[in-house]
């Protein structure tokens, strides 16, 4: 069964609450909010507001920046959201790529290895705190002493953890420990501090999935895979729509249209692509942004 999450941001109260209601009514599985401090709304504040006007849709950040978030504060936000939503919170974590966000909180962004170490340490700590454990850790990447989350305690016995990444080590870790693996397909951060290279060729996606499978080798049930859709458009001329995107990104049109991060074509073509993604890579979940809301409804898969 294919499921869709909606990533969105509030611009005012009325439209945000209306969007939350409509997303739930349409059948979206999750409402997600991004985490870019200073450039968008605080995710857990926005999601708590959405919780007040919904009753079924799950709620989570996509994704909280583990580089600049402290585990106890993050766990408290998640647990509070779980309480006020009646057990519908999710943890969403990523390593954090934007240099300006690190500098804004008085930290220098580490290299890739340092960001990965920090992300894993934060994920482990948040998981332990939500599960009722005590966290003491002293490393170059994370420092916490006897941290506990006594109140509030989550409603759910286990709050699901999504890790969003394309990094080899994090994909392997997510395969072993996450409840959902968020496939971003994004590579090196470009000099603007926001854009990325992409890893969208089929062989590159194969390599990413192999890392998840390697990490999940010891699990009875591997985690589901969720692709972050960057481009979605229903059209009768998929190649013409895809061509400028392919040229900008630096991939062939055929590779672009084959990637799970792009859903372009007629309804039948997109549905066929989704079937191929599941058959080849096991992808059953998609995260889309607000402009794709109506297109997802048109697919008839919600």
Image (cartoon, rainbow, N blue to C red):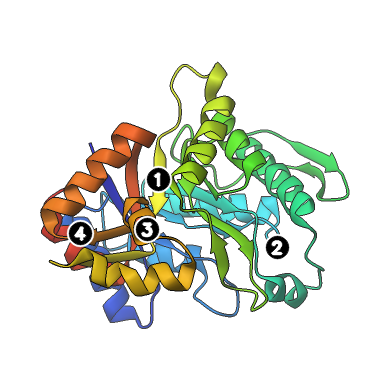
Q: Nearer the N terminus, badge 3 or badge 4?
A: 3
Q: In the drawing, what numbered circle is on residue 68?
A: 2
Q: Position of residue 189 (x, y in %)?
A: 64, 66
| CB within 8 Å, label 1 to label 4 | no
The span from disc 1 to disc 3 (Cα, nearest Å) is 17 Å
Q: Mark 3 or mark 4, which is nearer to you?
A: 3
Q: Nearer the N terminus, badge 2 or badge 4?
A: 2
Kindly state the secondary structure of the residue where label 3 is placed.
helix
Rendered position, 115 above or below 278: below
What residue lies at 23% left-to-right and 72% top-to-bottom? 18
Q: How many neighbours does mark 3 have within 10 angstroms: few (below 14), some (14-19), or many (20 or more)?
A: many
Kindly state the secondary structure of the residue where label 2 is placed.
loop
Q: Position of residue 220 (x, y in %)?
A: 46, 16
Q: Position of residue 33 (x, y in %)?
A: 44, 64
Rendered position, 250 above or below 136: below
Image quadrant of residue 26?
Answer: bottom left
Q: How many neighbours does mark 1 have within 10 angstroms: few (below 14), some (14-19), or many (20 or more)?
A: many
Q: Give the residue number, with chain letter if any, for mark 1.
A: 226
Q: Give the residue number, with chain letter if any, for mark 3.
A: 256
The span from disc 1 to disc 2 (Cα, nearest Å) is 24 Å
Name the side, left or right, on which 45 lies relative to 197: left
| CB within 8 Å, label 1 to label 2 | no
């Amino acid at each position: 069964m294919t499921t869709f999450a909606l990533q969105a941001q509030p611009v005012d109260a009325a439209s945000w609450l209306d969007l939350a209601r409509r997303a739930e009514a349409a059948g979206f599985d999750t409402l997600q909010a991004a985490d870019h401090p200073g450039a968008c709304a605080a995710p857990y504040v926005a999601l708590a507001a959405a919780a007040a006007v919904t009753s079924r849709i799950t709620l989570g950040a996509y994704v909280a920046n583990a580089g600049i978030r402290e585990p106890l504060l993050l766990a408290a936000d998640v647990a509070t959201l779980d309480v006020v939503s009646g057990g519908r919170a999710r943890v969403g974590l990523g390593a954090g790529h934007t240099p300006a966000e690190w500098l804004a909180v008085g930290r220098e962004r580490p290299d890739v290895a340092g960001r990965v170490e920090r992300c894993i340490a934060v994920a482990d700590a948040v998981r332990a705190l939500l599960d009722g454990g005590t966290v003491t850790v002293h490393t170059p990447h994370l420092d916490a002493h006897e941290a506990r989350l006594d109140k509030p305690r989550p409603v759910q016995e286990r709050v699901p953890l999504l890790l969003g990444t394309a990094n080899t080590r994090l994909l392997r870790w997510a395969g072993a420990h996450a409840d959902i693996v968020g496939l971003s397909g994004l590579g090196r951060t470009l000099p603007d501090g926001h854009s990325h290279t992409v890893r969208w060729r089929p062989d590159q996606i194969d390599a990413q999935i192999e890392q998840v499978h390697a990490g999940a080798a010891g699990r009875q049930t591997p985690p589901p895979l969720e692709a972050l859709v960057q481009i979605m458009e229903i059209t009768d001329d998929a190649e013409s729509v895809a061509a400028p995107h392919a040229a900008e990104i630096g991939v062939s049109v055929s590779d672009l249209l084959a990637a799970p991060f792009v859903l372009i074509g007629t309804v039948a073509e997109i549905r066929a692509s989704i079937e191929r993604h599941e058959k080849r890579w096991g992808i059953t979940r998609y995260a889309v942004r607000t402009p794709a809301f109506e297109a997802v409804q048109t697919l008839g898969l919600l």
